[in-house]
Image (cartoon, rainbow, N blue to C red):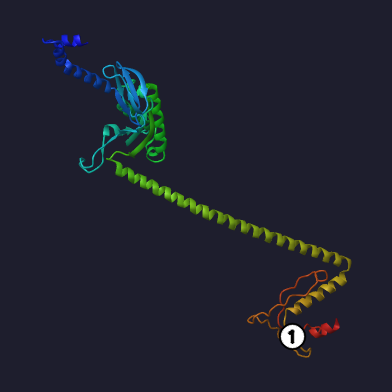
Amino acid sequence: MQAAVRRMVGGGGGPRMRFTQGRPLLLIGIAVVVLWLASGFYRVQPDELGVVLRFGAYSYRTDPGLHWHLPWPIEKVLLPAVTRINRTEIGYRSVNPQESENGANTRDVPSESLMLTGDENIIDINLTVFWKISNAENYLFAVRDPDNLVKAVAESSIREVIGRTPIQPALTTLRAQIEQDVHKQTQQILDRYGAGIEITQVQLQRVDPPPAVIESFRDVQRANTDAERMRNEAEAYRNDIVPRARGDAARIVAGGQADKQARVALATGQAQQFDAVLKAYQSAKDVTLQRMYLDTMRDILMHAQPLVVDNKLQGLLPFLPLNLPAPARRPAQTNPASSPSTAPAQAPAALAAPSGGTSSDQGSGQ
């Protein structure tokens, strides 16, 4: 070793002098080798994964922590952040508000945001795709530019989904469904490419008509909202008034049925009563006629104001007091079995005596 070093450094003098003159170069060489070996140490952060390349080809991977590999140019380490959530923006770009002309924190990209819907309308959509690395080897070696790949695939997916969706549902009720469809389709395409990327979430940041017609479209939306509100109010009024009307109708029908049954029962009773009187009349005509006459006269006198006149009084004029109030009626105390006939109308207050005598004479004669 010393001879080799001496041959490299050359020079005259004794052996000891020649070795002393070559010591600095030896120390420098040792230091370079140590530094070269020390350059093989590397640290993998908690959100990273170490991928070691040997002569440019994949060799193995390492977990978070301190590791060592053969220094360059033999081996090389790549440290992709496999747990970090990456963000890809479609239709807009995030900017610094201080650098923006109008103070906004986003800048619209019309070439990406304007899309054609299923009913041939134009819609302005801003989309954000969140993704992470699922396979570090595929992410590093299977695709050249993973970020642009995610953007191109997501933009293609959103255009296809919007192309089969009408504009009105896309603006209102189908936003969540559109996000799910874009998420699913984007992931399927990336899996076919073997990109080693996992889509974690797709968010629609803005779904609006183009700026040129947005005010008119919002007027249409407000009109539709008012129509829906009025329809709901009409439904509420119908739900309130129809049950009440049905209840009133049922009550009226029930009352009519009850009145019908009462009247039918009353008519049936009266018919049965008339049949009983007819049978009694057919069996004993004189007795029945006399009894009916007495019952009728009793009812008349109970509800009238009789006036007894002496039979010696001649030229009595019958008087019907139409201008006087009718006296209060008292309920007739009759027995249906013995008095089959009902009470007739109220008799006049004064009656002229018949030619055969006065009413008192008739009562005494009977």
Which one is in front, 307 or 114?
Answer: 114
Single out the residue that lies furthest toward the bottom: 312
Q: Can the viewer see residue 73?
A: yes
Q: Is residue 330 above or below residue 86?
A: below
Q: Is residue 347 left or right of residue 185?
A: right
Q: Amino acid at mark 1?
A: Leu
Percent of width and height locating residue 187: 39, 28
Which one is in front, 352 or 299?
Answer: 299
**Figure quadrant of the C terminus:** bottom right
Single out the residue that lies furthest toward the right: 283
Identify which residue is drawn at 20% across, 17% down.
29
The residue beneath circle 1 is 307
The mark tally for this picture is 1
Q: Is residue 351 above or below residue 269?
A: below
Percent of width and height locating residue 312: 78, 90
Percent of width and height locating residue 153: 34, 27
Q: Is residue 77 left or right of residue 331?
A: left
